[in-house]
Image (spheres, rainbow, N blue to C red):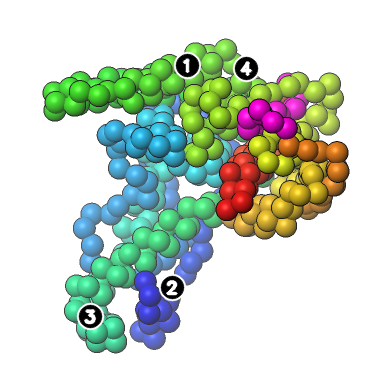
Amino acid sequence: MAGIDIKRFFNNFGQNYNSQTFAAKNANNVPQFQPQPQPAAQAPQNLPKAPDIPTPAPQTPTTPAPSMPANTPQGQAAFAKDMFGFPRNANEFIYMVQRGMTQAQFNQMFSNQMAAQRMNLSQMQAQILAQLQGLDTSAAKQMINAQLAGQVQGSLRNLDILSGGMINLNQIAQMFQVNGKEAITKLIMQMTEASKAGVADLSQLKEMAKFINASVAIASENNPQKTLKLLLLLYLPWLPLEEGVDFEVEFQQNNQTEEGDSILVITITTLHYGNVRATLVLETSNSVQMVVECSDEFPKKELQERIEGEQKYYSMDSVMSFETNEGIKAQENTKQSANINMSQTNEINPYLLLMAHTIIKQVIEIDNNFGG
């Protein structure tokens, strides 16, 4: 909201504006995920406090129930996550899995806390703010609400990740199976309603049904590497959902034993810079050492800035270094892909997972922006 410093304005009226974010109460007490409905979770006590304005019923921070997917890779991927009942961002997903929560419980937790913190903005305060901005009271309140909504969305990226809360890939596979079957039911209902409404082209919904069915089938194999592949693809929202189209993710099993559980080697094939090879080593529970081997032409500074911009939300300590290989060249008739070398394990550290997601996403986005 241009021109209004909400924090300073309400501080003048003795308000205590607090922008703290979620924090885990006990990092060692990580409940197991159960796919069936659970009692509503208790809200954490340190969500961001907002100056209160009369508003309609509390709104959840997520997107409303999906209807038809947007005909873009981004829209289709977002629609798929909604159908699975998964949150839009990878860190929200990890936060919920570590605490055994469902999307509905997360929404309710957030709404309850925001509702409890809201109080009425006095008429005098609203009138003063309106006079300062040359606006009527209603317009001033709308502008404040818009800024508060942005602050709420921003706080979602600062959810506290439990460094000791390993992500169990068997549990993730179970989520894909249970939620996927529910998603198919929802899709059938949507196709029925769309047909009644006279919608003739249901191809997008049918393709989504194929993707979800395929995901359920893959998850039922209980193969940790395939499960992780499903998860990574789902949280690269600018990618097509169909395998073999523009981008592929493949896994290889390394021969290391105990140390292999703390190492990921990711080779990303780009269109313009050749292969980018990132070795991720977990040094402590929330510290990742990353060495990137790339061509001299690859924009190393840009990648580093992008990675730093992402990891600041995750309370992660990491060190990033580069090794330049002049022999790396872009090849003709290649397509973007990622090959991940990992141990055959049923668990993965949340920070390794987040960093793997981030490095693949940022390298491909840099490649897509080549010359732009």
As drawn, the label of residue 17 is 2
Q: Label 4 near label 1: C-beta < 8 Å?
A: no
Q: Out of 155 and 131, give the one closest to the viewer.
A: 131
Element marked by disc 3: loop
Distance Cα–Cα, label 3 vs label 1 = 54 Å
Q: What residue type is labelled 2?
A: Tyr
- The kind of residue tagged 4 is Asn
Q: How far apart are marks 1 and 4 (CA)?
A: 14 Å
Does residue 166 show up?
no
Give the distance between the C-alpha atoms of the residues marked 3 and 2, in whole angstroms. 23 Å
Question: Residue tagged by mark 3?
Answer: 135
x and y, in percent, of residue 8 in the image: 43, 81
| Residue at point 63%, 44% (across, down) | 367
**Which residue is found at the position 38% from the left and 24% from the top?**
208
> Residue, x 39% and y 86% (percent of image)?
12
Q: Identify the mark nearer the N-term, 1 or 4.
A: 1
Locate the N terminus and report the quarter of the image it occupies.
Answer: bottom left
Task: Categorize mark 4 by other alpha carbons within 10 Å: few (<14), some (14-19), many (20+).
Answer: some
Residue that carries the numbered disc 4 in the rendered image: 223
Verify CB contact (< 8 Å) between mark 3 and mark 1. Answer: no
**Bounds of the magenta span?**
331-344
Quadrant of residue 107 in the image? top left
Q: Position of residue 36 (x, y in %)?
A: 41, 25
State the image coordinates of residue 323 (x, y, percent, origin top left). 85, 47
Q: Which residue is drawn at 54% across and 55% down?
A: 158
Q: Name the residue under label 1.
A: 214
Above or below — where is 262 with respect to 177?
A: below
The answer to whether residue 85 is above or below residue 355 is above
